[in-house]
Image (tube, rainbow, N blue to C red):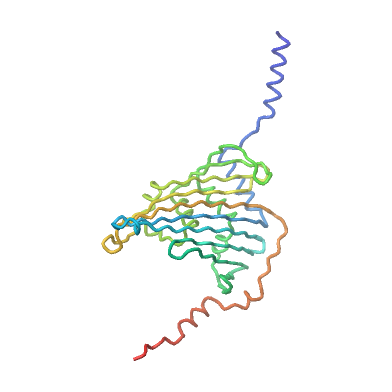
Amino acid sequence: MKKLLLLLAMIAVAFSGCVEEKPSPEELKAMMIDSVDKIQTAAFAVDLEQTIKIVNLSETDRSLRTETFTTKSSGEGVLNVTARAMRMTMTTTSISEEMGEVTSEMEMYMEGDTMYTNVDGEWMKMPGMPEEMWDQQNQVKTQAELLNASNIELVGSEKIDGKDAFKVKVVPDTETFTAILSQQMGSMPFYAMNITQLFEDSEMEWTTWISKESSLPLKNRVILKLTLTSDMMGIPVDEMGDLEMIIDSDSTVIYSGYNEAVSIEIPDEAVAAPSWLDMLMAMMNEPSEVPAA
């Protein structure tokens, strides 16, 4: 019996040495921020799907009561943090009953304080961009800062692209929630809405995966569902009807290629493109058409 108890004790000690030590949420955030601050290059891939359903509760004809718009976007890019340069491509397909299926291609570069964009074959450059614009384009740093400002909970371990990672549930505060909304649906005028009410009424499932080896983000997924009413959007019911907008959004970003060599070269046609200010001035100087008598 003593030998058996001794054997069991030895087995217990052996297995206890194999138990993985998990960092606390605050330790993990600190390690992640420290690692992100040291990266020189990174690659990312983005997938986003959004469905917006607009319901006019004032419409008596049920066939005209609901309109649905679906947007699917996928893209990829690379960052050279040291050189303050970025390249990204994005394909977006919008689907609606009225317009059918429309696909748009976007290519974007940033070098220093100048951004170059190509939308469906037309280049434009925007020089003199503010310092914070580059920080916004650094997706790795932006996501790390949002995670750092949130409450996180380690909920397990998974492999991402063959790498061991901590699976983390993220619970944002109101300010971080607003930043996520701006990322997901930048065209929505959320600044004019009651964000507190929106925060309390919405559903957000935010999960991120952080490398156990490097403490760098490997994957980020945000599933969001919210409902906006005419009152929340400041739309007069007597003019537009009693509207309800139901938004479902599912976005995933995969991070990879940390500190690998990248080459970002601005195309000649982008360098030679007119600036947005030149294009604006040209549009303002175009003679207006005088209707025939």
Q: Is residue 287 above or below residue 169?
A: below
- Res 232 visible: no
Which of the pair 292/34 is nearer the observer? 292
- Drawn side of residue 62 relative to residue 267, left or right: left
Q: Is residue 290 above or below residue 17?
A: below
Residue at (52, 75) in percent of width and height = 276
Which of the pair 135/221 is nearer the observer? 221
Which of the pair 250/125 is nearer the observer? 250
Based on the displayed image, in which of its 4 quarters is residue 44 positioned?
Answer: bottom right
Based on the displayed image, in which of its 4 quarters is residue 111 positioned?
Answer: bottom right
Could you tell me residue 104's position as x and y percent? Answer: 54, 66
- Drawn side of residue 19 relative to residue 291, left or right: right
Image quarter (top left, top right, bottom left or bottom right) of the N terminus: top right
Residue at (30, 62) in percent of width and height = 240
Q: Is residue 56 above or below residue 290?
A: above
- Drawn side of residue 24 relative to residue 262, left or right: left
